[in-house]
Image (tube, grey):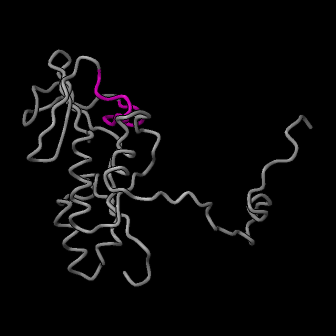
Amino acid sequence: MDQYVDWWNFMGEKPTTTPFETDAAINYYVSNGVVPSKLVLGLPLYGRSFEATDGLGTPFGGVGPGTWDAGAYDFKVLPFSGATEVYDNLTGSSYSYDRITRQLISYDTLPVVDQKAAWIKQRGLRGAMWWEMSADQANEDSLIRNMHDVLSLEIDNSLNQLIYNNSAYDNLRAGMPEPTDTGPA
């Protein structure tokens, strides 16, 4: 299959659907013929929350309401006021914990992205991707900008080359032209 695709998006950030360790999975792909420079590592722009917990390795009583899904908060709203952010260099992970609310949220931070970028370079992978970008912070704490800067990659800003000549929709067949009439009918 590798000979037929330009790149592979490896999205292993959901432990319920990908219950394996990322390095082992990348090794598996490469040992089965996938060229490392075609692998793009998917990263999350959200945190997973755990409520009514005394911290890492302790039971929890549920998940928070989340930004868009129960237990999932956009990175741009983290850490919450009152929470202490913790980075673990050994595991390449980070989280915030609020002793008052007893809420722990696990998410990537700038140091984690730095570690992941170094790993991407060391493994010779193509780069990184995110499912959607609106959850990132729009400042110097942007995970996407940080990854871009660390990897020193060029961003392709060219328009797509998709052509839908057989589409049932006039606007798609016409190549999505800008509207010419913006006034009332």
Depth check: give the residue in front, 25 or 159: 159
Q: Position of residue 145 (x, y in %)?
A: 39, 45
Q: How many marks?
A: 0
**121 sits left or right of 132 in the view:** left
Depth check: give the residue in front, 97 or 18: 97
Q: Position of residue 134 (x, y in %)?
A: 47, 40
Q: Quadrant of residue 171?
A: bottom right
Which range of residues does the magenta coloring cover? 66-80
Name the residue rendered at 30%, 35% in the picture. Answer: 71
Residue sitting farthest toward the right: 185
Q: Main secondary structure of the magenta part?
A: loop
| Residue 6 drawn above or below residue 71 | below
Query: Can residue 133 be found in the magenta stretch?
Result: no
Placement of the C terminus among the 4 image quadrants = top right
Name the residue rendered at 80%, 60% in the picture. Answer: 170
Q: Quadrant of residue 18?
A: bottom left
Depth check: give the residue in front, 129 or 37: 37
| Residue 164 drawn above or below residue 11 | below
Q: Position of residue 29 (x, y in %)?
A: 25, 74
Placement of the N terminus among the 4 image quadrants = bottom left
**181 sits left or right of 35 in the view:** right
